[in-house]
Amino acid sequence: MMTTITQERFRHVLGHVPTEVAVVAGATDSGPAGLAIGTFMSVSLDPPLAGFLVAKTSTSWPRVEPLGRFAVSVLGEDHIETSRRFASSGGDKFAGVPWRPSGLGQPVLDESLAWFDCTTADITDAGDHKLVLGHVHDMWVQSQGRPLIFCHGTYQRLGSR
C-alpha cells in the first residue's frame, strides 16, 4: 500500500537529515551577492564537480546565476549569525562580514572552514529547486574547526572528536 507524501510530511521527515550550512556568493556589478544553502555536495572527482540546490523562489540566486561563476564558503559551528544573515531576504548581507575575492574574483568569507571557487557547469530544474553544478577551479580548508549543521529545524553542533 502506497502512502501519500504531502509536502508537510516530506519536510518533517527530511528535517531529521542533518545538512551542512554554506554560503554561495558572486561578485556582481552592484556589489557582492550571496545566499545560504544546506545542500552542498561533492559530485565528481574527474572532473572535479560540486553541487547545491537553490529554491526557484530565491531572490539572491538570480543576481549570482548570470555571472557563470560563484564561490561556496562552508560555515563553522560558531557562525550561526552569518548563516541567518545569508538566509534572510534583502539587505546588505555582506555588511560587517569580512571576505576576500577568490582567484576567480568571487567573495569568499574569511570565517569559512573551507571554500570552493567554481564556474557554472550546469543548471537543471529539480521540482521547486534548481540543481547547480560547479566546476571546481580552486579550494581551501582550515586544519581545525567543525562545520555548522542544521537538523530538526535548528542549528546543531557535532560531538567532540
Image (cartoon, rainbow, N blue to C red):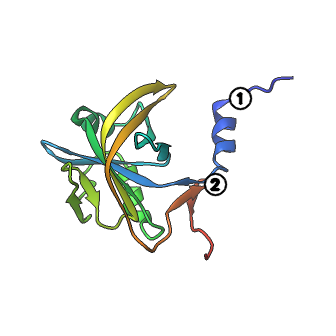
Q: Secondary structure at mark 2?
A: loop
Q: Dot 2: within a 10 Å radius of its alpha carbon, few (fewer than 14), some, or many (20 or more) residues?
A: few
**Residue 37 at what x, y percent from top left?**
44, 47
Q: What residue is shown with label 1?
A: 5
Q: Dot 1: within a 10 Å radius of its alpha carbon, few (fewer than 14), some, or many (20 or more) residues?
A: few
Evaluate whether residue 128 shows in this view.
yes
Residue drawn at x 87%, y 23% as measured from the top left:
1
Residue 36 - label: none
Residue kind at label 1, given as amino acid type = Ile
122 on left or right of 20: left
Residue kind at label 2, given as amino acid type = His
Q: What residue is shown with label 2?
A: 152
In the rendered image of this protein, does residue 76 appear above or below residue 8? below
Residue drawn at x 61%, y 75% as measured from the top left:
161
Front residue of this view, candidates 62 and 124? 124
Residue drawn at x 40%, y 32% as measured from the top left:
57
In the rendered image of this protein, does residue 20 appear above or below residue 60? below
Front residue of this view, candidates 133 and 45? 45
12 on left or right of 138: right
